[in-house]
Amino acid sequence: MLRNSILLIVFAGLCSSCAQDSRHGSLYEAKVSGTFSIVAVEPKAGICGAAVASKYPAVGKIVPYARAGVGAFCTQHWHNPKWGERALDLLAKGHLPEQVLGELLHSDALRDKRQLAIIDMSGRAANRNPARADASGVWWGAVSGKYYACQGNTLVGREVIFAMARAYEESKGSLADRLMAALAAGDRAGGDHRGRLAAGIRVAKEGVKDYWLELYVDKSDDAVVELARKYAALKHEAKGTRSQK
């Protein structure tokens, strides 16, 4: 109850209705991130970003990627961090999101283990769920809407993704505020069924080199709550007026 109260207090005013395989051996251990994440853009403002949480350590530094004027991308389940910059390079060259995913997966021997999400600055989004998620996956899926896409695997159930989508659509404030609200909503809905170890948010803005905002919790007993506390205490232009109070 206490952790839910903290999350609700942090985001009060942002959202009015957000209630709540052995043959691969060590490769499995090194490459699998059970995760829930969101990618989103604000086309007119030239802002894009992604947020993620998982039982996987330092997940905020390996799953989400964003680039000013280009878009955002997430690689998860059997994640491949090398795809982060490559996906954004392809998007920057004018490839449609679906074309980028096709290019990444075309010759990939582990394509059926990947979960990917990508969105460009026009708000065109595409998801790819794993066709053969691991047994621990329990539930995986994705949902997209106006200028955003939510996706996850190894979750307690479908409500995690739908809660994230509702929170992003119904929250007030900046893109960063809404990404955080979505992450908090997914966490309150149960998140990763194995636990809450790490979380992160990355936001990029046209005219700003590298990430405009990046905030991480790499190891914690309650990562999203800790990330929410850090975000609430942060003074940054990426935050909306309401969350600055």
Image (spheres, rainbow, N blue to C red):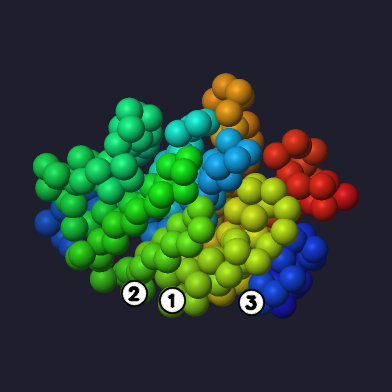
Residue 162's spot in the image, x, y percent? 50, 72
Q: CA distance from mark 2 to mark 1?
A: 10 Å
Name the N-terminal-most of marks 3 and 1: 3
Residue highlighted by disc 3:
20
Is any atom of residue 150 visible in this view?
A: no
Task: Give me the residue at 19% from left, 58% from top.
Answer: 112
Question: Depth-wise, is mark 2 or mark 1 nearer the camera?
Answer: 1
Report the amino acid beneath label 3: Gln
Q: Is residue 171 left or right of residue 22?
A: right
Q: Is residue 238 above or below residue 78?
A: above
Please tell me whether residue 160 is drawn above or below residue 225 in the rendered image: below
Residue hosting label 1: 158
In this view, the residue farthest toward the right is 245
In what quadrant of the picture does the N terminus appear? bottom right
At x 70%, y 74%, the residue is 17
Q: SS for tag 1?
A: loop
Observer-nearest of 232 and 106: 106
Residue 138 is marked as 2
For this view, does 39 lie left or right of residue 240?
A: left
Give the image location of residue 184, x and y in percent.
Answer: 63, 63
